[in-house]
Amino acid sequence: MDSHSACLRGLSTELQLAVIECLDPVALRNWSSTCSSYRALLAPYIFKVITLRNTERSALSVDAVANSRYVTYVEGLHYIATAPGDSGNDNDEGVGVLSEEGESVPSEKGESVPNTIPVFPGIVHKVLSNLESFLSLHTLSIDFAFDFEVIDWNEESAEPINEAEETEGWRAVMAKTFAALLENTYLCIKALEIRQLPSTEVSTFRTDRFHDFLGTLERFDLSIHGSENAAGWNINTLDRYLAFVSKLDEFFFDHLNCVTHFSFRADETGPIGLEGRNHARLALSPQQMPRLQYLNLEHIFICEELVDFLTAHADTLEIISMRDCYANIGGLEENGIYWEQLFTALYNAKPRALGQVHILPIDLPIEDEDAGADAERESCRRTRSLLEQDKRRRLFAYAMLNDKYGTLYDDEEQNVNSFLEGRDQKAYDDLMQVVHEIQATFVSRSLA
C-alpha cells in the first residue's frame, strides 16, 4: 500500500465514497490495485457497467466476470460492435465479405479477401445469449461503431436481406448481435440504448420475438448514423436512408408499450420530419408509448406527426427536451409548420404533468447587419436590440435543406421575421405559463 492510499484510508467512509464518485473507470481500477480492502470497496463501482466488444479477447473477459463473485455488481453492459472493414480489410469496398466460418472468400471482384478475425466469435454469441447470468443487469447499450468511410456509400444492394446478412461483414454483425440477444430465455433488460444505428434493415427487426422484447422496455434511446461522402452529399439524399427511417415505427416505435423514457436522435446530415425532397417522415403516432413521461429529440423537423404525438401524451408527459430541432417554412418541405402551431396545440391539450420544456439552443444566428437590403439590416438591428432589452424573449430555429446535397442550413431571415412577428414567442409564453403552474403544484405537494 503506497502513501497516497494510506492518506485516503484516514478519510471517513463518506468522504471516500465522495472521492469514488468523482473518478473515471481507469482511475478506479488503478486505485483498486493498491490493496485488498480497496479492491473490495471499489468492486461495485468498477463492475457496475462493463464493456463487451465483438472480439474473442473481450468476450472471454466478460464471460469470466459472469462466472465470478463480481457478477452481482453488473447493472449495465456496453456492447461495442465493429466490422471487418474497419481495421484495414483488403477488400476495396471494405464490406468484409465472409464465409460462415469466418474464412476468406472471393469478393464480387473475384479477389480473395483475407479475414484473420471472425466477424462474430462464438464466445461473443455465448455472452449475449446468456445475459441472465448477470443477476442485476437492467441496462444494455449497443454501439455500432462501424467505420463507414471504408464501406461502400452507394444505395443498398438488391440482394435479399437474409443473403446480405451472410455476406456483408458489418450487416452480419448487426444481424448476429440481435439474434443472439433474442436467444435469452428471459430478458432482464429494462433500458436499451442503440447508438449510431445504420440505416439498414436486418431480419430481426420484423420478428415477433424482437417486438415482444421491445414491449418489456421502460427506457429506449435510439440514435441514427449519419454521414456525408467525399463529394459533400449528405446521407439524406439516399433513398435507402429515407425509406429506413420512415419505417422506424414498424421496427421499433409501435412496440414500446411500457416505455416511460424515450430519446430519439437523428444526425445533422439526416434530420427527420416533414415530406418532400431529402425529407423523411417522422414515424411517431398518437397510439405509441402510452406511458411516456420523458421525451428527448435531436435534429428533428417539427411537423404534424410530432404535434399529434405530443398532444396525445399530454396527460403523461413530464419533460420535453428538444435540441437542434427546427421548423421549416418555404423550403423543400411540403407540409411545414411554425413553432407557434406546436406550442398552441400542446397548450390546448391541457397538459397535466408537464413540469419542464427545453427548446435548445437559445442563441441562434441572425443575418449579418451589413448584408442584404436596408429593410433586412434594420430587421436584424431591431431583433438584436429587442433581445438585449428583454432577456425573456428568444429565437426559435428555422432551417432548410439544400435540394442537391441535402445540407442543413439556418433560415436566418425566417428566424428574424418570426421573432419580430411575435407569434411563436406568444404561444411559447402561454405554454410555459402552464408549465410553471404545474411546477408550483409539484412544489406545494412536496412541502405538504
Image (cartoon, helix red, strand yellow):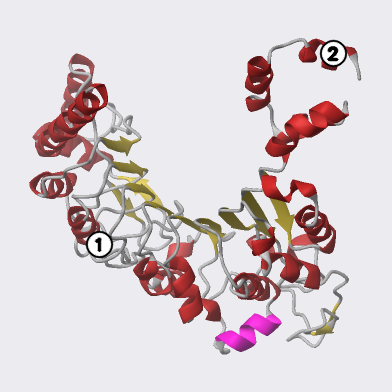
Judged by its main secondary structure, the magenta piece is helix
Dot 2, how many residues are within 10 Å of its Cα: few (below 14), some (14-19), or many (20+)? few
- What x and y, as percent, mark residue 415? 23, 38
Residue range in magenta is 161-167
| On screen, residue 12 above or below 130 | above
Which residue occupies the foreground of this view, 76 or 92?
Answer: 76
Residue of label 2: 6
The amino acid type of the residue labelled 2 equals: Ala
Compare residues 15 and 236 and report the one nearer the observer: 15
Quarter of the picture containing the N terminus is: top right
Q: Position of residue 394 (x, y in %)?
A: 23, 29
Q: Residue at x 79, y 84 (%)?
A: 99
Q: Give the label on residue 79, or none.
A: none
Regarding residue 349, the answer to whether it shows in the image is yes
Classify residue 196 as left or right of residue 339.
right
Going from N to C along the chain, the mark reached first, 2 or 1, is: 2
Does the image show residue 31? no
Q: Amino acid at mark 1?
A: Glu
Find out whether residue 256 is within the magenta segment.
Answer: no
Q: Is residue 166 magenta?
A: yes
In the rendered image, which residue does mark 1 sit on?
333
Q: Residue 375's x, y, as percent?
A: 14, 31
Left or right? Give the position of 26 relative to 245. Answer: right
Q: Nearer the viewer, residue 260 or 90?
A: 260
SS at mark 2 in the image: helix
